[in-house]
Image: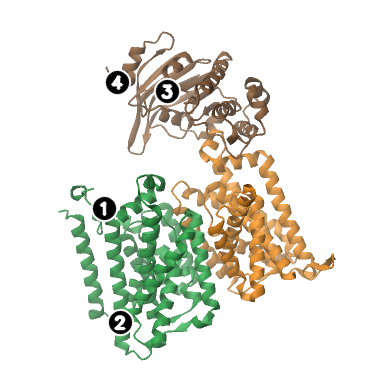
Chain colours: A brown, B green, C orange
Amino acid sequence: MISINDLHAGYGALSVLFGVSLHVAEGQTLALIGSNGAGKTTTFSVLTGFVKPRSGNVTLNGSVISGLAPTDIVSMGLAMVPEGRRLFPSLTVEENLMIGAHCDRKGPWDLKRVYSVFPALEPLRKRPSSSLSGGQQQLVAIGRALMSNPNVLLCDELSLGLSPAAVDIVYSAIARLRAEGMTLIIVEQDISRALASSDTFACMRHGGIPLSGPSAGADRAQISSAYFGMD
Amino acid sequence: MRLPSINRSFIVLAVIVLFLILVPILGSRSTVNLVAEMAAVLAIALMWNLLAGFGGMVFMGFQVFVGIGGYAVFMAANGFQVLPFPFILLSAALCALTALAIMPILSRLQGAQFAIASWVISEVVRLTVFQTSVLGGGGGISLTAMRSVPRELRMYGTYGSAALVLIVALVVCVFLMRSRVGLALRAIRDNATAAEAMGIDLRRTQRLVMMIAAAVAGAGGGAYYMLALQIGPGTAFSMNWMAITLFVVILGGIGTLEGPIVGVVVYFLLRETLSDLGSVYFILLGLMAILVTLLFPKGAWGGLRQLIGQDLLPIRRNPSESKG
Amino acid sequence: MEVLINGAFIGALYGLYGLGLALTLGLMRQINLAHGDFIVFSAYLTLQGSLLLGVHPLMVLPVVAVVMFVVGFVLQRLVIERTLGRGEMPPILVTFGLSIILQNVMLELFSADTRNLNPGPLGAASIEIAGLSLGVLPLLTLAVSFAIFWATSAVFGSTKFGRAIRATSDSDQTAQLMGINTSRIFAVAMGLTLAISAIAAGFYGMRGNFDPSTGPERMLFAFEAVILGGVGSIWGTLAGGILLGLSQAAGSLINPSYGPLVGHLVFLVVLLALPGGLMSLRRRQ
């Protein structure tokens, strides 16, 4: 479904990614883990088109998307739930969802389906998005991304700043999407949570991927040493 | 050989002072007047650059200080019928006070809003002067105190005043920017919130720099209008001052000390050769300002600096001499 | 009384000038210092068109609005777009340069003479309402202003384009993540800004004089209307414009030449006492 091939990228004189390669098959979920500064955010920025790769590329369903404008990447079927949710405060809940459908990509997701998957949102639809709790906002952000009918959904730090109860609700929504066959890449600080919610994982460090493999039965000691660089 | 940066600044300042001393000795009457005018314009541009280029305060009503500075000299000298030259100190004081008075309005504004509010303030002063008959109303006033002054004294006195204001402007820029205030100012421009979090008093720093810039620009305005001998609200508070200032600063290189010096030379060269073209000349100036901003944001000095390889008036200490 | 009513009508025009400016200020966090010069330029276009075709200025106005939309769109794409994301200064410098260019181009093309648009019989026509004799032209002006404000607010509130504009003004980066082409939104907004201002310019030209140097003052009035009303509020801008118009009218009652001065002073006082503008009063209640 989505492949990252030997990606090098950076900002100005600063290089951040040094040959990152990843592949996520259709219906699979990849958990991207790693400490701050490991290159997760830059990887997402290349995927969404805000950073152009120096070399290497990203393909979605076989066509190259790296280097395209963010707008075009959305209409090719890649959507993101950004870190910190980033809802539009001047828009209501429903308007936030509708803006997700801005590029008119055809598919199964519409308002009705989002409300049926996240029933908690329907009674809030006319509310300003800024009046919602963090957990509710995160559901809106996920619903908003789904409205573009993506082939691949990126989720950046879903649990950041949420109460444990809200995190449970958000991740049960992710479980539901996985069950429906959505392809996902998630970035998550909580490694147990990340492994429990994914099929495969990749651990980033210094702009590369020292360790990856299936999430089920992953060796925690191995992950720790890859994460912290204790070889 | 790389000199310690402060010594380099002293040498360059000394060269400029020497040049300013030589002009009246060697130059013709028209040269002296032209250099006097350049000095006043450059002092004003340096101060605007201090606010906008270093401090991020895009003060679009800077003509207010030019006008107040000019009127201060005229009113005081005419009132006492004495030599007008010392009254540029009065111009400076009055403009510093004006800056102090308007800071409560401006200090909480940023960017475009700061720019426009400062412009409106300048309009208020212009319209008020226009309505005030003591200040000559719309017709303006002549510097009658200058009538009894011998021609030579008039020329050299005016030149000296303008040159002195320029030297003060340069010294202020070099030392202010190398001081803690300058560091704070640049920190505020780069990231106001972070600067405040580090304990920099944003309002106090901005107020101080605003008062200094206003004072020197006011003195520059005073010197300029001594040369013109005639002042009116339409010209003294005109947006043309803003246009000239912007042109000098942008073309030379905004946010550097050398930039406006290069810019003022370029501006006067263009003016002396092309101003017969009338409005076409202004269209060219506007086009150049836009092109330089878009394509060469570092201005003419940015290009020259690459050739020379070092700052002539460094505002950052060399790492080796820095004590933090 | 009549002076004040006139002030309110003029204020509605200031509101229109400001509406466009508010749009670009909210979206791009920057203003176009040449805004007023484009207003004057539109007035000249209307004048030339109506003289050339021998028709009433109001007949030419829609065409001028369309032309100015295109001018705004192209200007944004070719020039202003390049200044965005580089800090507050470049847009200010570039649009100031544009202002100088426009003023001098108009001086070359149309001379420094003061001009106005001939409203024809419309100028003198008046109707009697509740014992007050009101000019048809001011009433028409007010009606057109309200119609444009109403249309803008409807487009903003309930269309896909309006939603995209509001999302972009909240965060243009997140808007891009939603597949919104923000550069196009900016360009359309700049086009609308100039088109709306062109209509205001046409009505202003039938009531007052203009010459190539009057642009900056128009820009200041427009900006004052926006700030007086409160940035980000469409109807606030209309209220701000009317407050400004009334202040100027009140000033000119004291002395005919005090109008703009009093307007500026009211603006500064409100800025000092009520930084959020008139609409922040309503929110507080």
Q: Nearer the viewer, residue B2 or B86?
A: B86
The residue nearer to you, when weighing B248 against C175, is: C175
Looking at the picture, which amino acid does disc 3 mark?
A: Gln
Q: Residues within 10 Å of mark 3 (few under 14, many from 20)?
A: some
Residue drawn where x is 47% and y is 49% of the image: C82
Q: Position of residue B205 (x, y in %)?
A: 36, 56
Label 3–label 4 contact, CB within 8 A = no
Q: The disc labelled 4 sits on which kind of residue?
A: Gly
Give the structural element (helix, strand or loop) at label 2: helix
Name the amino acid, label 1.
Arg
Q: Position of residue B165 (x, y in %)?
A: 31, 72
Chain identifier of the residue bearing label 2 in the image: B
Residues under labels 1 and 3: Cα distance? 41 Å
In this picture, is B314 found above or below C251? above
Residue occupied by mark 1: B316
Label of residue B157 in the image: 2
Mark closest to the chain's N terminus, 1 or 2? 2
**Circle 1 crowding by C-alpha within 10 Å: few under 14, some 14–19, many from 20:** some
Q: Which disc number belongs to residue A189?
A: 3
For label 4, the SS is loop
Which residue carries the number 4 mark?
Answer: A229
Q: Residue furthest bottom?
A: B148
Q: Is residue B121 visible?
A: yes
The answer to whether the residue labelled 2 contacts the one labelled 4, judged by CB atoms less than 8 Å apart, is no
What x and y, as percent, mark residue B51?
39, 59
Q: With B197 as the anchor, is B163 left or right in this view? A: left
Q: CA distance from mark 2 to mark 3?
A: 72 Å
